[in-house]
Amino acid sequence: MKITIIGTGYVGLVTGACLAEIGNDVFCLDVDQHKIDILNGGGVPIHEPGLKELIDRNRASRRLQFSTDVAASVAHGDVQFIAVGTPPDEDGSADLQYVLAAARNIGSHMDGFKVVVDKSTVPVGTARHVRAAIEGELRRRGVRHEFSVVSNPEFLKEGAAVDDFMRPDRIVIGSDADELGERAREQMKRLYAPFNRNHERTRHMDVRSAEFTKYAANAMLATRISFMNELANLADLVGADIEAVRRGVGSDPRIGYDFLYAGAGYGGSCFPKDVRALVQTAAEHGQALRILEAVEAVNQQQKDVLINKITARLGADLTGRRFAVWGLAFKPNTDDMREAPSRKLVTGLLERGATVCAYDPVAINEARRVFAHDLRDTPEAHSRLSFAKTQTESVDGADALVIVTEWKVFKSPDFSELTQALIEPLIFDGRNLYEPEAMAELGIEYYSVGRPYVPGVEHAARALRVAQG
């Protein structure tokens, strides 16, 4: 099939490359010439495991092309995927300007039946606005062409997006109940047939329900994270171990283990934006989503959990202190810094007078750009932030290590080398990577999230000396 993907961001690139991989002729459009130049030059503007290899292979076979030519993109695809960004507006609602601009471009150039697919995460009712935008352009041109708008939300995890697309657990397709909707549904069935050979994964429904499904799924996952984070904070107070609690709760098959890890809060391009957008949608209809309002509030508070533990141990004034930070991306296997907990942590340390040396396996370049923006009004604080080439380099001469992202490379470091590099063996772990008892045996003062602090022999002796005056 001939497919057009409008937008070469995270969703668009993965969708286009994967659809080309199963044999489709895919045209990827973007209005950003720089991004298209990168892609046509053999580069990839985002980090996603396996994506570059997929793009290289399908560009070589001529099943995948990249261009800024709008007219050519509309002419190419029988199915037009809109996969542009929907950034949050000031009130938290999704900004649809790029979605509607894409729809108008389709209406400006289409010359026959098109299936227009909303792949971007959009509020309930967006298909109606997309339809109106296309119809407006057709009227302006004085022509009549048939089309149908379909909702086909993505369910991709950053860091595992290619695998998620190629081995989906569900494919949601929302279409209209009329004749054109049935024609579009048949096109989508044909497109996704290769993914349904083992068993039927497609869930057909009306358009509004499909739009709602995406928001509901992300809101549920965000709720589980904030729920466990709030329990972790209580576990800190009552002396329980949230990891033991997680295993006990997750063993219930009605609950399961996924998204029950306590930590420093969620970030990224989806959960924060989608929770707020769903809350705003409810407000527009006169309803309060109290649970999701609490989910958002808990998550914002949780991003302070590490700085609170640090200041409780070292004091509010961190002038002269040097911190190593491991992990900047909001999650492993991506360079995405959008709403990453590290941004609030690093800024908080710098505001308190500290010096920070940060390391991330892939997000350093994006982190440089993001922190240059975040700290643009405080150049003196920005001057106290540096980035290490290796995780070992980052801890050399640091007063403490702070872990923010659970990259695999951080899970089994050389603790002997680590403690020798640190001025004192002090670790604040926002992802609970290590066992407190094991850290105590190594003589490391270790603070995690929702687990009791276990003093080592040296720390217990020091506490005794302090108590005795």
Image: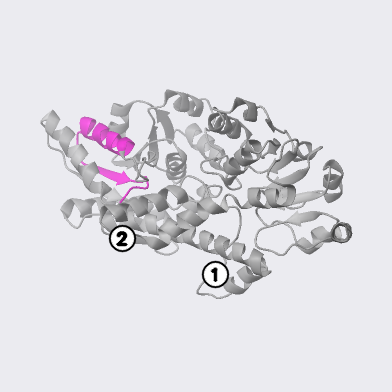
- Give the quadrant of residue 233: bottom right
Considering the image in quadrants, where does the N terminus appear? top left
Depth check, front residue: 200 or 313: 313
- The residue indicated by pointer 2 is 204
Residue marked by disc 1: 256
- Sort mark 2 into few (<14), some (14-19) or many (20+) by Cα contacts within 10 Å: some
Element marked by disc 1: loop
Which residue is rendered at x = 72% and y = 33% of the image?
389
What secondary structure is found at the residue carrying circle 2?
Answer: strand
Which of the numbered marks, if any, corresponds to residue 363? none
The magenta span reads: 97-123
For the C terminus, which image quadrant?
A: bottom right
Residue at 84% across / 59% down in the picture?
A: 463
Q: CA distance from mark 1 to mark 2?
A: 26 Å
First in sequence, mark 1 or 2: give its number: 2
Residue 352 coordinates in the image, percent (x, y)? 65, 39
